[in-house]
Amino acid sequence: MSALRLVHTTHHTTTPLEQPTGCDEFRAREALVQRVFARWVVLHREGRPVQPRLTEQRRQAVVMALGWGFDEAAIEMAIDGCKASWFCQAGNRTGHPLDELTWILGSAERIERLANEGAVAREAIEQRQAAVRQGLAAQATQATNAARERLRALRDELAQRAMRRGG
């Protein structure tokens, strides 16, 4: 049976460990696995009738990716990239989504490729969100200016009415 590896970074070096050396390391690794799994569930399984389970195979896939030197951000970026990928979302020859966590994290090369796709997708989303924010800001400015004009017109009309009654 092949040993699982956990990345232990000290002074920017990577040391494979078969098991976490302490309770705190184990808890930290398990919390990371839980966060990665939750991200995958939200992006790829939410709304399905059967809630996915964090199986040993899925847990090992995350731990293996850590052993290859990927951090949590890169693993999550690969999960995002899979969601953004036309190929992974049934554009392949099978016509079925390739979005199982164990498949996404099945090799270092796949993680790299999907993480790159995820980075491109996130950048595109951020650009769209910035454009929307700018558009909303412009709309808000226009609405504010229009409201000011209506208030000025109302103020002027009320002043004229007051002059007619008093004058």
Image (cartoon, rainbow, N blue to C red):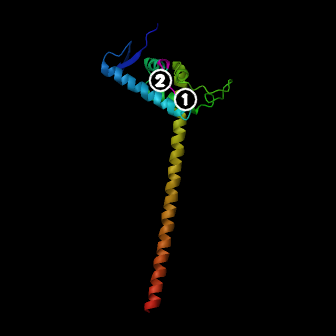
What secondary structure is marked by label 1? loop
Instruction: Name the residue located 49 percent from the left edge and 71 percent from the top edge.
Output: 149
State the quadrant of the C terminus: bottom left
Image mark count: 2
Q: Position of residue 1 (x, y in %)?
A: 46, 7
Nearest the viewer among 131 and 59 is 59
Q: Dot 1 surroundings within 10 Å: few (below 14), some, or many (20 or more)?
A: few
- Verify CB contact (< 8 Å) between mark 2 and mark 1: no
Locate residue 33: give its quadrant.
top left
Instruction: Examine the rendering and report whether any part of residue 10 can be seen.
Output: no
Q: Going by the picture, which residue comes out furthest to the front?
A: 49
Q: Position of residue 141 (x, y in %)?
A: 49, 61
Disc 2 versus disc 1: distance between alpha carbons? Answer: 13 Å
Name the kind of residue labelled 1 in the image.
Val
The answer to whether 50 is drawn above or below residue 60 in the figure is: below
* Foreground tag (2 vs 1): 1
Q: Position of residue 47 (x, y in %)?
A: 55, 35
Q: Which residues are magenta?
A: 52-57
What secondary structure is marked by label 2? loop
Disc 2: which residue:
54
Q: Main secondary structure of the magenta part?
A: loop
Disc 1: which residue:
50
